[in-house]
Image (spheres, rainbow, N blue to C red):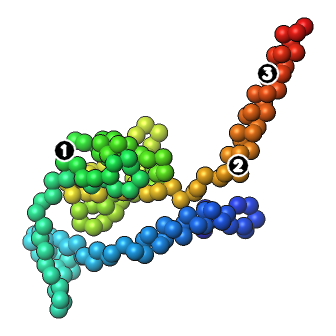
């Protein structure tokens, strides 16, 4: 992550560092889920006894109902939960959430599966790889932590306007001849 903040010879861009620090502080305030996903299929446990977890004092066993929604969180226009429909793709659910926000980092989108495991999304030039998206999944679209470089933007806009002014002046000179 620190490698992303480098601006030349071992100098850290202060605005990028500040954005990353804000993100880290947000993560620190999140409540830990504290769950352990287990396989409860008796045939799997019979063939692989190491998958049979031992309960400890204070453990609570909770078996949720089969979920019927897909949650889309993070940097989308309208985060929320949407009804699961067989055959819908990750892109369909993101579109249903209004699409990516300008502050999103599409390349870091990931899915949290109902068992608590997470999976990165690989995007090809055509579309996302075929992903099995089971009901109860959560699609997370992270924020782009690289802020707008105001100095570079001013330089780019100034360059465009100066080139435009030179073009207008050249056309004015040619028109007088």
For disc 1, the marked residue is 85
Q: Is residue 161 left or right of residue 96?
A: right
Expressed as whole percent of the image width and height from the top left, the position of residue 167 reads 79, 23
Q: Which mark is residue 157?
A: none
**Residue that sits furthest to the bottom in the current view:** 57
Task: Please report the residue visible at 45 percent of the width from the left and 43 percent of the height from the top.
Answer: 124
Looking at the image, can residue 132 be seen?
A: yes
Q: Is residue 115 left or right of residue 124?
A: left
**Residue that sits furthest to the right in the current view:** 177
For disc 3, the marked residue is 168
For disc 2, the marked residue is 152
Packing grade of label 3 (10 A; few <14, some 14-19, many >=20) is few
Q: Earlier in the sequence, mark 2 or mark 1?
A: 1
Task: Please report the residue visible at 42 percent of the width from the left and 71 percent of the height from the top.
Answer: 27
Task: Please report the residue visible at 18 percent of the width from the left and 71 percent of the height from the top.
Answer: 39
Q: Is residue 46 above or below residue 157?
A: below
Compute the Cα span from label 3 to label 1: 56 Å
Observer-nearest of 50 and 133: 133
Q: Is residue 129 left or right of residue 125?
A: left
Expressed as whole percent of the image width and height from the top left, the position of residue 47 reads 15, 73
Q: Earlier in the sequence, mark 3 or mark 1?
A: 1
Secondary structure under the numbered disc 2 in the rendered image? helix
Secondary structure under the numbered disc 1 in the rendered image? loop
């Amino acid at each position: 992550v620190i490698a992303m903040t480098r601006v030349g010879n071992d100098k850290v861009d202060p605005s990028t560092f500040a954005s990353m620090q804000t993100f880290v502080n947000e993560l620190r305030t999140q409540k830990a889920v504290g769950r352990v996903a287990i396989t409860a299929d008796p045939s799997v446990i019979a063939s692989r006894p190491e998958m049979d977890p031992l309960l400890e004092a204070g453990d609570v066993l909770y078996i949720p109902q089969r979920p019927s929604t897909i949650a889309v969180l993070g940097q989308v226009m309208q985060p929320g939960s949407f009804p699961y429909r067989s055959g819908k793709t990750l892109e369909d659910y993101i579109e249903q959430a209004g699409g990516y926000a300008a502050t999103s980092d599409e390349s870091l989108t990931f899915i949290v599966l109902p068992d608590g495991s997470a999976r990165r999304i690989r995007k090809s030039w055509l579309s996302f790889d075929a992903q099995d998206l089971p009901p109860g999944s959560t699609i997370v679209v992270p924020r782009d932590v690289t802020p707008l470089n105001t100095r570079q933007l001013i330089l780019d806009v100034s360059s465009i306007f100066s080139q435009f002014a030179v073009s207008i002046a050249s056309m004015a000179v040619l028109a007088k001849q």
